Amino acid sequence: MFTPPARGNRLPVNRGTTPHRLFDAVLLDRDGTLVEDVPYNGDPEKVRPMPGAREALDRLRAAGLRLAVVTNQSGLAKGLFTVEQMRAVHARVEELLGPFDSWQVCPHDDGDGCRCRKPAPGLVEEAAAALGTSPARCVLVGDIGRDVTAALAAGATGILVPTPVTRPEEVSAAPHVAPDLPTAVDEILRRMAAVRPAAPRRAATVLVVRSDSAGDVLVTGPAIRAVAAGAERVVLLHGPRGRGAAALLPGVDELIEWPLPWIDGDPAPVDPDDIRRLTDRLATVGADEAVIFTSFHQSALPLALLLRMAGVARISAISDDYPGSLLDVRHRVPAGVPEPERALSLAAAAGFGLPADDDHRLRVDVPSVAVPDEPYVVVHPGASVPARACPPERCAEIVARLTAAGYRVVVTGGPAETALTSRVAAHGGTDLGGRTGLAELAGVLAGARCVVVGNTGPAHLAAAVGVPVVSLFAPTVPFGQWAPYRVPLVRLGDADAPCRGSRATRCPTAGHPCLTQVDPDEVVAAVRLLTT
């Protein structure tokens, strides 16, 4: 790592955190993002700002965000310009674009094996430290896949602003894409404003609802904590598939389990008597208000009707459909927002925000469980949705390759997955299939160095215990919306596979190409990147 003491390399000032603030800092790639890309530029006269860059950066400064530049400059290693020439270029950048709170520069070439050269996360980690924050509270804006990979591997948010040199596959794989820097800044500021309550409120008893799978309940956790910060009592209504996750969430005082036929993927017929019993049970809660959390494809209105019949006076939910008098707060969210932020924005619209010391991450109460004595990596081959599961034979190869690379591997799975975990673990792993409930699995994941998993509930559980994730991500749902949140991450899999955006539950393409083509050596490299 090389940090030249040029103008702009000021000693960082820790300005603390702002209540409800989603981000503390924005990190920016230099060439192709802030200024036109002139290869190996050592001449300040060739510095040309990208369109709208100065105005966009000033908007970030006005919002109280700290700014840093994170840039690979292999021209130093190649001897194509000197440190003094680079400093002159950076001084010219600041003359045109305004001051930056930190400059972080990698002076190495690709073959040097450093940790600072993007796509490695070192520059992002160093910039966050210099700015007095954590990578999870940073956004990195860059123009190529290396920038986004570095951001994700550090646990930061990545936004890609493509240029003519950006490869199409890099655009497809990016979690968030903006056409230019001003638009990226618009989105950063919009996301920050969305989770900040305009009028914070206090309440006695609030009923919160997230009736879906374990992963859905987990990604709603930060929003439920936001409600809990403003309520004396929080009651969570959840479905049978979310039972284990609901029991792990902090901030919940009481649980109500009830299957909802308009939410469950394999619903039983509507039973009028059951609906009457549910309405009566909701009435006994004595809730002053309710916040109904849903996924983008679900409707909150059937439950809102029951809550009205149960006497709940104030109801908030996301609804594109006209709600009539069923909702007091009708909230709308743009497509592609990360699910935790989508839920947080609803909580904010209802008047509830996270306290200043909350980092917005997923979180669970982790029980104490016995785990292997030596460091280990978890491979979780199963998924609740078959289309999102990596094929067993590929998972077995991944276990074999990790073992050969010197990693101890633990294979996990639920009671119905013991045949799968046995098959996968036979190639060198320790088989824990069927031996852990969700709570015990949280303890196993918390002790791991890294988790290799598809886009399924345990991926979000890994994020909730703060463990890096190698995400074998099937593109049936948007990566930016459903990726493990605010945790160091590497995405693998074909982002352009034919199933992209299909929301298919079973693979619509013969051979499951999006994950079959994952190279086990890439998994080993990803684990090494996240654990070094």
Image (cartoon, rainbow, N blue to C red):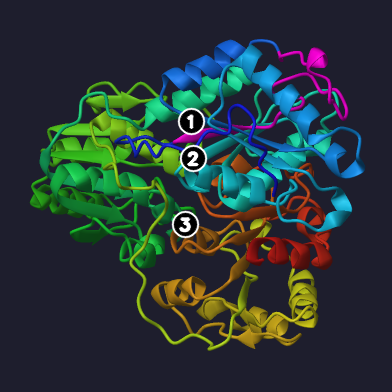
Q: Any magenta on residue 91?
A: no
Give the amino acid at mark 1: Arg
Q: Residues within 10 Å of mark 2 (few under 14, many from 20)?
A: many
Q: Give x and y (percent) for residue 213.
A: 44, 57
What residue appears at the point 30 percent right and 66 percent down from the top-left corner? 247
Q: Which mark is residue 66?
A: 1
Q: Overall secondary structure of the magenta stretch? A: loop
Left or right relative to 508: residue 264: left
Q: Quadrant of the C terminus?
A: bottom right
**Mark 3 to mark 1 CA distance (whole Å):** 33 Å
Residue type pointed to by label 2: Leu
Q: Earlier in the sequence, mark 3 or mark 2?
A: 2
> Can residue 504 be seen at all in this image of the molecule?
no
Residue under numbered circle 3: 215
Question: Residue, x 22% and y 25% (percent of image)?
Answer: 328
**Cβ–Cβ below 8 Å for labels 3 and 2?**
no
Q: Which residues are magenta?
A: 24-50
Q: Is residue 50 left or right of residue 185?
A: right
Mark number, residue 131: 2
Residue contact between numbered discs 3 and 1, judged by CB atoms under 8 Å? no
User: Visible in this render: residue 341?
Assistant: yes
